[in-house]
Each structure stands twice: as C-alpha cells, then as structure tokens.
Amino acid sequence: MLNKQELSELILKMVPEATFSEGTQLTEVTVPADKLLALAEGLKNHKDTAFDYLISVTAVDFITHMTVVYHLDSTQYRQLLVLKVVLTDRVNPTVDSVFSVWATAEFHEREVFDLFGIRFNNHPNLKRLFLEDDYGYPLRKDFRDEINIMER
C-alpha cells in the first residue's frame, strides 16, 4: 500500500495539474474535468493503487461552482481516496462519466444528474431517477420550489 505522500506523487505523475487538500485524513485530490476519466482508469488499473470500487458519487453546490465528489476504495490495499472535479459552468455542468471504469457509477451519476443537473458524457442511460423531467434540480442552492412552498 502506498502512503499518502507516495499516492499523491503517483497521481501527480498521471495528472500534473492535480491539487491536494491539506489537513485531511484521507487523500483528497482535485483534477480538471478533462483529466477525470484518464485518472480514473489509471487509478483502477495501476498495480500499486488498484482502486477497484467506486463507493459513491455526489456533488456540492458552492453557488460560484459545483464540485463532483468521488469516493474510491482499493479492496486489495484497503485504501480510500477522495477524487474531486470542479465545474464552473452552472448553465450546462458536464463531466465525463466514469461508468466505463466502474459500473456502479451508473446509478450514482443518475442521482447526481437528477438532483443537481450535472450531465455525464457517455453515460449509458442518463435519465432522472426520482423527479419529473421539468421539476428542476432541488439540491442546487438557487432552486426554488414554487409548487410546494409552505405559507407562514
């Protein structure tokens, strides 16, 4: 198993633009959206990392941008990694799907699409899970539910 420093150095070899969060228990790396898929493939297939399990995909709306967050696990090395991608286009937020790397991404990405409106390029079946097509994206900070507003 690689220690945090060795893992960070390996990731920087794969994606020199990667940045790392300081003071975190887990290794947290942020990469440009156009580097996500190549890094995901590298992290899964590299003999020293073998991140073979996508635990979750979620997103966070920071008003000025959205961040897609991936939690990865190497079942071989019992190591966890947090991978992030910052999306600055709020009108049409898109990132490549990691379904081709981890099949479990299919429903995680659909949920993020349904709740945040983030589109995943090359997803095999990107459609809403819970909500009507015209409902809006309720986990965005600018979402307003005009139908279900409670009167005070």
Image: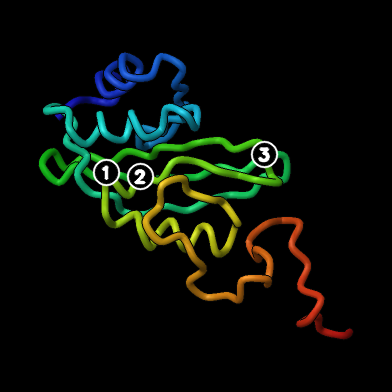
Q: Are marks 2 and 3 in contact (CB under 8 Å)?
A: no
Q: Residue furthest right?
A: 152
Report the amino acid beneath label 1. Val
Name the residue that disc number 2 marks: 98
- Asked if 51 appears above or below 4 in the picture, the reply is below
Report the amino acid beneath label 3. Asp
Name the residue that disc number 3 marks: 89
> Which colouring convention does the figure follow?
rainbow
Q: Position of residue 37 (x, y in %)?
A: 36, 34
Residue 152: quadrant of the picture = bottom right
> What secondary structure is found at the residue carrying circle 2?
loop
Residue 148: quadrant of the picture = bottom right
Q: Position of residue 134 (x, y in %)?
A: 68, 71
Q: Residue at x 29, y 57 (%)?
A: 104
Q: Position of residue 138 (x, y in %)?
A: 65, 66
Query: Which mark, residue 101?
Result: 1
- Asked if 68 appears above or below 36 in the picture, the reply is below
> What secondary structure is found at the residue carrying circle 3?
loop
| Mark 2: few/some/many CA within 10 Å (<14, 14-19, 20+) | many
Query: Which mark, residue 62?
Result: none
Q: Which numbered disc, 1 or 3, marks the residue that appears first in the sequence? A: 3
Q: How far, Cα to Cα, is label 1 from label 3?
A: 25 Å
Q: How far, Cα to Cα, is label 2 from label 1?
A: 5 Å
Q: Which numbered disc, 2 or 3, marks the residue that appears first in the sequence? A: 3
Q: Position of residue 135 (x, y in %)?
A: 68, 72
Report the amino acid beneath label 2. Val
Q: Is residue 83 left or right of residue 46?
A: right
Q: Are marks 2 and 1 in contact (CB under 8 Å)?
A: yes
> What secondary structure is found at the residue carrying circle 1?
loop
